[in-house]
Amino acid sequence: MNKCLCCMFFIAFFTLISCNNEEVVFNNYMDLPGASWSHKDSVAFDWEVTDSTAIYDLTFQLRTTTSYKWSNIYIFSDIFFPNGKARRDTFEFYLADPKGQWLGDKSGLIIDYKYPLYKKIRFPEKGIYKFTFHQAMRDSVLHELMNVGMKVTKPIQ
């Protein structure tokens, strides 16, 4: 019986591992000092594109506490290309539903959010790309925001 149980455990374990449908090529978080994010401060990530033909997904990551007072957040996202050009987009992410229930993965007092920014995109040239994020809320300083992150993955076909 123990051998059968052990075999079933290994089969389930390897099945779960093989279910991953993405290859992570970049994943980084930056701490927000004092768990506060001013509208004057940006969070920046540099990532080098070595394959301009590859397709990527970009994900915005955020960690808050349960004391964050808003149910959403607006973000300015800037991409600076190696050739000096830039692109800015504005995103709104919902952190809680209309009843006030947090939408992210909650563990104790911490909530972890992952939001798609760009899906199935190509970067036209090789080189260093700089990604910056600014909070764009009406409050000039947002409290109870702990980390901002960015993840880049290659979707597996």
Image (tube, rainbow, N blue to C red):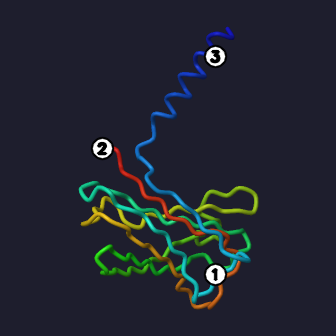
Query: Please, what secondary structure does the residue beneath circle 3 have?
Result: helix
Residue 99 in the image: above or below residue 21: below
Which sits earlier in the primary sequence, circle 3 or circle 2? 3
Depth check: give the residue in front, 125 or 63: 125
In the depicted structure, whether residue 141 falls above or below residue 128:
below
Q: Amino acid at mark 1?
A: Trp
- Asked which quadrant contains residue 31, the reply is bottom right
User: How far is mark 3 from mark 2, CA to CA?
Assistant: 32 Å
Q: Amino acid at mark 3?
A: Cys
Q: Residue at x 66, y 62 (%)?
A: 111
Q: Are marks 3 and 1 in contact (CB under 8 Å)?
A: no
Q: Which residue is mark 1?
A: 37
- Comparing 30 with 22, the one in front is 30
**Of label 3 and label 1, which has the lower sequence position?**
3
Q: Label 2, secondary structure: give it.
A: loop
Circles 1 and 2: CB atoms closer than 8 Å:
no
**Other residues around mark 3 within 10 Å, as few (<14) / some (14–19) / many (≥20):** few
| Sequence-earlier tag: 1 or 2 | 1
Residue marked by disc 2: 157
- Is 154 or 128 nearer to us in this picture? 128
- Residues at badges 3 and 2 in contact (C-beta under 8 Å)? no
Q: Separation of disc 1 and disc 2 at Cα?
A: 37 Å
Position of the N terminus by quadrant: top right
- Mark 2, Cα crowd under 10 Å, few <14 / some 14-19 / many 20+, is few
Inspect the image, locate mark 2, and give the three-letter code of the amino acid beneath it. Answer: Gln
| Horizontal and vertical percent position of residue 89 | 38, 79
Q: Quadrant of the C terminus?
A: top left
Examine the rendered structure and indicate whether residue 1 appears above or below residue 148: above
Give the numbered dot on residue 6.
Answer: 3
